Structures are given as structure tokens and as C-alpha cells.
Amino acid sequence: MNKLHKRPRRGEGFIQGFLFLAAALSILTTVGIVYELGKESLNFFTRQMWENTNKQIVADVRPEDLTLTINSSGSDLHSGEIIKISEEIMQVTAVAGGQVTVARGLQNTTPGAYNAGLDIFESRRVSLVKFFTTTRWEPQIGNFGIWPLLNATLMTSLMAMLVALPLGLSIAIYLSEYASQRVRSWLKPILEVLAGIPTVVYGYFALTFMTPLLRSVFGKGVVEIYNTAAAGIVIGILVIPLVSSMSEDALRAVPVSLRQAAYGLGATRLEVALKVVLPAAISGITAAFIVAISRAIGETMIVAIAAGAGPNFTFNPFKSAETMTGHIVRISGGDLSYDSIDYNSIFAIGLVLFVITLGLNIVSQRVVRKFREVYD
């Protein structure tokens, strides 16, 4: 009697290997993105910047001198500060009026001779505390407070969700519980067309249609030409197909037996949809909402065109403000030199965006696991 044994199937082995390589490639891509963002962001927070103190040395300095004579104007120097004259880096050890005692030749620089009148620069670094607590983003003068960009991003995303979530969920309930097969066959392609329109087209739609509409309703003196409200509303229109499609899939996954049981007890179609099907599909709907929020936060072209081109810490949706993604587009398209402080700030903003979307995805997975309904 022949023993049963596994028959080799080379085709299945090839497919399995291909799928494994695809999964490994996606993981390696994510790791590469995190590595680059982390490396450049670390360079941003550890880079030494130099700010002019508007002070000058008023007497010539020899290489062996440890005391500098400075003028009284400009910002004050304090013991322990790192300063620079020409290319030499020094550390202030004592300050007595117009006399500053320094330790010379720091960071492998060579003590030199300097003529009176040279400017004194002091060291500045971007701290995590100031990055997350201050509200001024002015890279040219060393102010790197993320809140103007983060606040504009959250405002546009909130506006988008106020539009997309109720409309998208309503469309999903209609397609799942009310629409006939004929209606669904022509309504679904229309939603897919919305999802396929390039976002740059949405951006100009926000600027040339939505903004004039808001200005006609609320007044030209209230609504600026570039504003976060118009950008947020159009982002909401953009993500409606995402919300409706994922929510409909969740609703249609609810067993028909639940609907039939509710109808047998005398429930109306609306009661079945809202009190039976919707609660049973809550995990999938919540996941759809969180994915839509992530999509809205990461949207770029709409906010770059319609929201504004300058950081502005404001809670007024009718004012111009620049989001994180919009700032990245504007700065990266300028004349920034590689490895400059402005260039590295782009990666710090990108890392913040990555952390936000990663957190939302983690929350989405936990919500799905907690509220998932399993039916036999």
C-alpha cells in the first residue's frame, strides 16, 4: 500500500516566495523611511547654529589672549555660552563688564589673531522643548516652534472630517441598506471617479470655487483668499469615497440573518440600519474613519494651493495658514542648500507626520480588535 505524502508543487512554492519577498520589501521600505527621517531629524536637533549677538570686539586679539574687550551693545553674553569669532569657536568662562574671559580653540578650531570690529556669534541649537511648545516657525532667525504648522494641519483635518464622516457614512448606509443593484451599479463608479481625480485639481477647485463661495456667504472681509476652511472642506470631499467604500464593506459584512431577525420583530428599514447593522459594523466603520483622518492629515497639494503659504498660529479657519505638508512642499521646492538647518527641518516635520499617522493606525487596529463581532 502506497504511503500518502506531500506532492511537490513548484508553482505554489514560487508564489509563496514571491509573496514573502513582497512583504519583506514593504517592511524594508518602511524601515528605510524611518531611518532617513530619524537620521536627518537627529541632525536637525543636534546642529549648531550661529546667531549674531550684534557685539564686536573693540580691541585687537592675539592667539594667546584669553580676554576679549567687547562693546556694550547687542545681546548679553553669559558664562558657559559657546561663541564664535571668524572661524574660531570659544567658550565664555567669565563676564565682567566689557571684559569677557574665554577658553579658546574649541571643537578643533585654531586660535587666531583678530582685528577690532569683528562680530561675535553665539551658538544656538533647536531643543525638543521649544520645538513642541513654542508657536513661532521662523527658520531664518532660528525659531522652530512646530505648533503653527501642526495647528493648521489639525484644523484642515477637522474640517475635512466634519464633511467626510457624516456624508460618507450616509452614502455607505444608503448603498448597503437602501440602494437597488441598478442604483449601486452607477453610483459606485461616480464615487470612484471622485477618488481618481488628481489632488492638484481639487486644490484649484478649492481656490477658485470653494473660497469664492465662502467669501460670498461670510463676506470678503471675513474670509481671506487663502484659508484653511476651503482647503479642509475640499479635503473632506476628497476622502468621502474612502469613508463610504470602507464603511459599506463593513456594513455589507454583517450577516443577513441579523437583518431578517430584526424585520421579523417588526423593525423598520431605518431601525434595522441604525440599531442593528450599524452597531454590528462599528469596528470596520471606526477603522474607516481613522484611515480617512490619516489621509486628510497627509494631504499635500490641496493645502499647498488653497490654505496659504506662511506659518500662522490661528484658530480662525477663514485665515491663511500653512500646514506641515504644505510647508514641506514650499520649502523643498525652494533654493535650500543640502544639509542646511532649513533643509533638515523638513525631515523633523516629516517625522512628526509619520508618528501621528502611525499612532492613528495603531489606534485603528486596537479599535478593530476590541469591537470586532464574530458570527458563526
Image (tube, grey):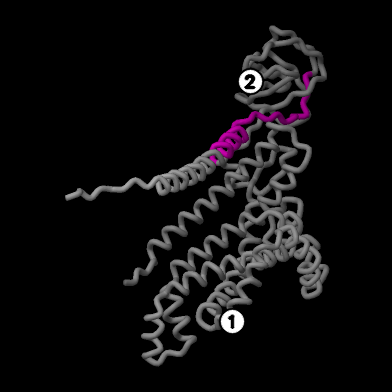
Q: Amino acid at mark 2?
A: Gln
Q: In the image shown, does 287 or 7 lie closer to the viewer? A: 7
Say which quarter of the image contains residue 55: top right
Say which quarter of the image contains residue 293: bottom right
Q: Amino acid at mark 1?
A: Arg
Q: Magenta region: which residues? A: 34-57
Image quadrant containing the C terminus: bottom left
Q: Is residue 64 left or right of residue 250?
A: right
Q: Which of the two discs, 1 and 2, sits closer to the camera?
A: 1
Residue 123, relative to residue 345: is it above or below? above
Residue 214 in the image: x percent, y percent?
77, 71
- Asked if residue 205 is among those painted magenta in the image, a careful observer would answer no
Label 1 crowd (10 A; few <14 / some 14-19 / many >=20): few
Numbered badge on residue 91: 2
Residue 163, relative to residue 71: is it above or below? below
User: At x 66% / y 56%, what residue is drawn?
Assistant: 152
- The mark nearer the N terminus, 1 or 2, is 2
Q: In the image shown, does 120 or 23 lie closer to the viewer? A: 23
User: At x 69% / y 27%, what residue is drawn?
Assistant: 122
- Asked if residue 46 is among those painted magenta in the image, a careful observer would answer yes
Residue 10 in the image: x percent, y percent?
40, 45
Residue 335 in the image: x percent, y percent?
78, 37
- Write down the residue under mark 1: 182
Say which quarter of the image contains residue 77: top right
Question: What SS does tag 2 mark?
Answer: strand
